C-alpha cells in the first residue's frame, strides 16, 4: 500500500503537534539554566528550545504552500522540525 505525500504531511505534522505538549514542560524547566546566574549558554539554550513552535509552524506553513509544486521539498520541510526535539533530547540526556 502506497501512502500519499499528503498523508505523510499530515502524519509528520501531527507528530510535531504532539511534541508541543512536552515542549511546554521543557520550556518551563529550561529557565532553570539561569539558576547559577547569567550565561550565554543559558540564553542560547532557552532561545533554541523556545523557538521550536516557530520553526514547527514555519515548516507546516511552507510545506503546505509547496505541496502542489514541489511535493518532495514539502515533505522535507514538514519533517525538519522533528529533528529539533530529537537533537535537544540527545543533548539533554547526555
Image: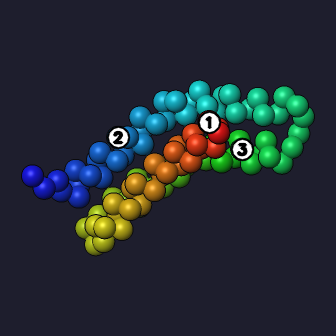
Q: Residue furthest left?
A: 1
Q: Earlier in the sequence, mark 2 or mark 1?
A: 2
Residue marked by disc 1 = 93
Q: Are marks 2 and 1 in contact (CB under 8 Å)?
A: no
Q: CA distance from mark 2 to mark 1?
A: 24 Å
Residue marked by disc 2 = 14
Quadrant for the C terminus, please. top right
Q: Residue at x 46, y 48 (%)?
A: 82
Whether 87 is drawn above or below 28: the answer is below
Q: CA distance from mark 3 to mark 1?
A: 14 Å
Residue marked by disc 3 = 45
Q: Residue furthest bottom?
A: 69
The image quadrant of residue 36 is top right
Q: Name the secondary structure under disc 1.
A: helix
**Residue 83 picture location, percent across and down:** 49, 51
**Residue 31 picture location, percent across and down:** 74, 32
**Residue 15 picture location, percent across and down:** 37, 40
How packed mark 2 is, by other alpha carbons closer than 10 Å (few <14, some 14-19, many 20 or more), is: few
Q: Residue furthest right?
A: 37
Give the side of residue 52 with respect to residue 59, left or right.
right
Q: Residue at x 18, y 56 (%)?
A: 4
Q: Residue furthest front?
A: 94
Q: Earlier in the sequence, mark 3 or mark 1?
A: 3
Give the side of residue 25 with respect to residue 63, left or right.
right
Give the side of residue 14 with respect to residue 36, left or right.
left
Q: What numbered label is drawn on residue 73?
A: none
Res. 7 in view: yes
**Residue 30 picture location, percent across and down:** 70, 33
Amino acid at each position: 500500500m502506497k501512502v500519499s505525500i499528503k498523508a505523510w504531511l499530515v502524519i509528520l505534522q501531527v507528530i510535531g503537534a504532539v511534541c508541543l505538549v512536552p515542549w511546554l514542560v521543557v520550556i518551563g524547566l529550561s529557565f532553570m539554566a539561569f539558576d547559577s546566574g547569567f550565561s550565554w549558554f543559558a540564553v542560547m539554550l532557552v532561545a533554541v528550545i523556545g523557538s521550536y513552535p516557530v520553526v514547527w509552524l514555519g515548516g507546516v506553513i511552507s510545506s503546505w504552500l509547496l505541496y502542489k509544486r514541489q511535493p518532495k521539498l514539502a515533505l522535507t520541510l514538514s519533517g525538519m522540525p522533528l529533528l529539533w526535539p530529537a537533537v535537544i533530547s540527545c543533548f539533554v540526556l547526555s
